[in-house]
Amino acid sequence: MPCHILTLESYRERQAAFVAELELEPEFKILITLLSLRENTAVNAVQQINDLIALVEGSKNDGCHIYNTACCVLEIAVRMAPEQPKLVSFVHELQKTTVLNGTTGKPLVFDEECETWRDLPTFEFKFGDELQIKGKLETSSLHFAYSSHYSGYILHIKIL
């Protein structure tokens, strides 16, 4: 198997391809609609995301929607104005939501330990990966501030 060296250029190429695919995902469209339409609310967007999970619950794809949500929040936060109150409200509402397993009636668990959405599964490692890669390839490009109000790194996202 050939060895590939991670360079800034190769990272950007792979990231551009990933973002192009991400823009086609329903989670991305839900969040863009939330931010672009004044009458759209965070509660409505959370319900739409949870409806996606309910459609595929128990299959391999329920984790995809959870991961896609974290990826979309990060991508949109980086693109949009440094402070996005509706995006912050979305994550806050998301974390207050409990998705129940349709079979057991208990909270849906991701990766055997993270309750969806209380623990914001996939947010921590997606954001951590991004920070680690960005830190190695570029001098400070993103700063994430941890808030004691949430278990994830989401409240303040600033582009330097």
Image (cartoon, helix red, strand yellow):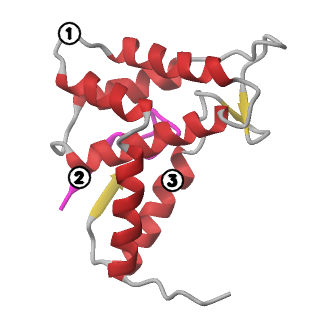
Q: Are marks 3 and 2 in contact (CB under 8 Å)?
A: no
State the CA–CA distance, disc 1 to disc 3. 30 Å
Q: Amino acid at mark 2?
A: Lys
Q: Is residue 148 magenta?
A: yes
The numbered mark, 1 or 2, whose residue comes first in the sequence reads 1
Q: Amino acid at mark 3?
A: Lys
**71, above or below 96, in the image:** below
Q: Amino acid at mark 1?
A: Glu
Q: Name the mark nearer the viewer: 1 or 2.
A: 1
Locate residue 79 relative to residue 119 in the image: left or right.
Answer: left
Neighbours of disc 3 within 10 Å: few (<14), some (14-19), many (20+): some
Neighbours of disc 2 within 10 Å: few (<14), some (14-19), many (20+): some
Q: Is residue 154 magenta?
A: yes
**Residue at the disc numbered 1:** 39
**Residue at the disc numbered 3:** 126
Q: Nearer the viewer, residue 48 or 132?
A: 48
For the C terminus, the image quarter is bottom left
**Residue at the disc numbered 2:** 158
**102, above or below 129, in the image:** above
Position in image of residue 52 (x %, y %): 55, 22
Q: Which mark is residue 144?
A: none
Position in image of residue 25 (x %, y %): 43, 36
**100, above or below 30, in the image:** above
Locate residue 1 relative to residue 5 in the image: left or right.
Answer: right
The stretch of residues the image draws in magenta is: 146-160
For the N terminus, the image quarter is bottom right
Residue at the spot 65% in from the left edge and 37% down from the top edge: 63
State the CA–CA distance, disc 3 to disc 2. 17 Å
State the CA–CA distance, disc 1 to disc 2. 25 Å
Residue at the spot 49% in from the left edge and 88% down from the top edge: 5
Q: Main secondary structure of the magenta part?
A: loop
